[in-house]
Image (cartoon, rainbow, N blue to C red):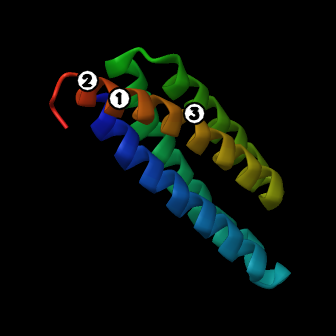
Amino acid sequence: MCFQYAERIKSELILASALIWRVVELGKEQHAEAGKLVECFLLALRGEIRIASNALKIPNFEEAGGRVEEAIQHVRRGEYPLANRLIAEAISRITTSGQRAIETLKMNGLL
């Protein structure tokens, strides 16, 4: 389960990062509306991470959810580079858990 959650959430975090950088590339007059869309995506992603965290009880998922929550606050303030740094930290935490899951699956001949 950890492997599946980690892969899906990692993909969504990478997409979130790309969306945030796209907002930065837009003109300032478009930041507010584009930021609202990114915020909606991040809120949904935070929900997915909470589900995984509750199911798995792995601290890295909880920490990643915290980083996404912080990123949402930065997006609301228009602080997109800071938001993206937090998303990168969340990616790192999820990747770490995913890698551990892969190693466990390999050791047990399941991958």
Residue 85 is tagged as none
Residue 52 visible to the viewer: yes
Residue 48, quarter of the rendered image: top left
Q: Mark 3 Cα within 10 Å, few/some/many (few <14, many 20+)? A: many
Q: Quadrant of residue 90?
A: top right
Image position of 60 with respect to 68: above or below:
above
Are the residues tagged 2 and 1 within 8 Å (C-beta)?
A: yes
At x 54% / y 24%, what residue is drawn? 60
Q: Which residue appears at 50% of the width and 27% of the height?
A: 61
**Label 2: which residue?**
107
Cα gap from disc 3 to disc 1, whole angstroms? 16 Å
In x, y percent, where is residue 54?
A: 38, 19
Q: Is residue 78 visible?
A: no
Q: From the viewer's perspective, is residue 56 above or below residue 35?
A: above
Secondary structure state at the residue bearing disc 2 = helix
**Marks 3 and 2, how far apart in space?**
22 Å
Q: Which residue is labeled 1 in the image?
A: 103
- Secondary structure of residue under mark 3: helix
- Number of numbered discs on residues: 3
Judging depth in this view, the residue of 72 and 7 nearest the camera is 7
| Sequence-first disc among 3 and 2 | 3
Whichever of callouts 3 and 1 sits on the residue coming sooner in the sequence is: 3
Q: Which residue is mark 3?
A: 93
Please state which amino acid type lies under the numbered disc 2.
Answer: Met
| On screen, residue 42 above or below 29 | above
